[in-house]
Image (cartoon, rainbow, N blue to C red):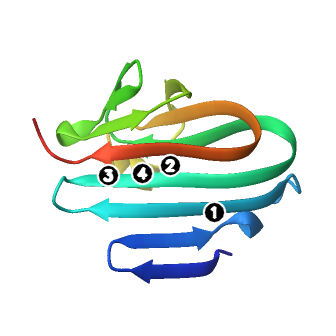
Amino acid sequence: CASDVKYDNDKFSLDIAKCYESGNVKVWKRDFIFNRDDGKIEVTESFELEKESEIKLTFMLPEKPVISENCIGLSEGVKLYFKDLKAECEEIKDMDDVVRRQWDKIYKLSLITNKKSGEIKYYFDMMQS
């Protein structure tokens, strides 16, 4: 259901507004910038909602992340940096057998904010320190 999908050199963008069935999403564009020299992936979520709502950006992980202020340590030394977002993590107990064979545990990481419109920026640092 994504539209206006574009890739040019180190930038990938798509419009995902139609992927949400809530009817509250007017505009939602997601842009990725791949900086291979620095080992970073920058992500910008640009959105406009009908009304202010809780927004949760969700990531499923095979290992429990280490959450600190504005930074989350992921597996293999990858770090996720963010600002003005609340981070929450919970272990998913109910997994189907296919997932359970692949991953011993699974965690749901959520980055949360309340807004009607604007941008949310975060980036992944893939360089191992």
Q: Position of residue 105 (x, y in %)?
A: 37, 35
- The answer to the question of whether label 2 and label 4 lie on touching residues, with beta carbons closer than 8 A, is yes
Tag nearer the camera, 4 or 1: 1
In primary-sequence order, the first of circles 2 and 3 is 2
Q: Is residue 78 above or below residue 86?
A: below
Q: Which amino acid does label 2 sit on?
A: Asp
Inter-mark Cα distance, 1 to 3: 31 Å
Identify the residue at horizontal 39%, vertical 53% (top origin): 42
- The answer to the question of whether label 1 and label 3 lie on touching residues, with beta carbons closer than 8 A, is no
Residue 99: which disc?
4
In primary-sequence order, the first of circles 4 and 1 is 1
Residue, disc 1 = 29
Q: Position of residue 123 (x, y in %)?
A: 38, 45
Residue 64 in view (yes/no): no
Seen from this angle, which residue lies furthest top? 68
| Secondary-structure class at tag 4 | helix
Residue 1: which disc?
none
Inter-mark Cα distance, 4 to 1: 30 Å
Determine crowd level at label 4: few under 14, some 14-19, many 20+ residues with C-alpha closer than 10 A.
few
Q: Which amino acid does label 1 sit on?
A: Lys
Identify the residue at horizontal 55%, vertical 34% (top origin): 111
Inter-mark Cα distance, 2 to 3: 10 Å
Q: In this rendering, would 49 be left or right of 120?
A: right
Q: Where is residue 98 in the image (x, y as percent from the top left)?
A: 42, 56
Residue 102: which disc?
3
Identify the residue at horizontal 10%, vertical 35% (top origin): 129
In primary-sequence order, the first of circles 1 and 3 is 1
Q: In this rendering, would 22 be left or right of 5?
A: right
Residue, disc 2 = 96
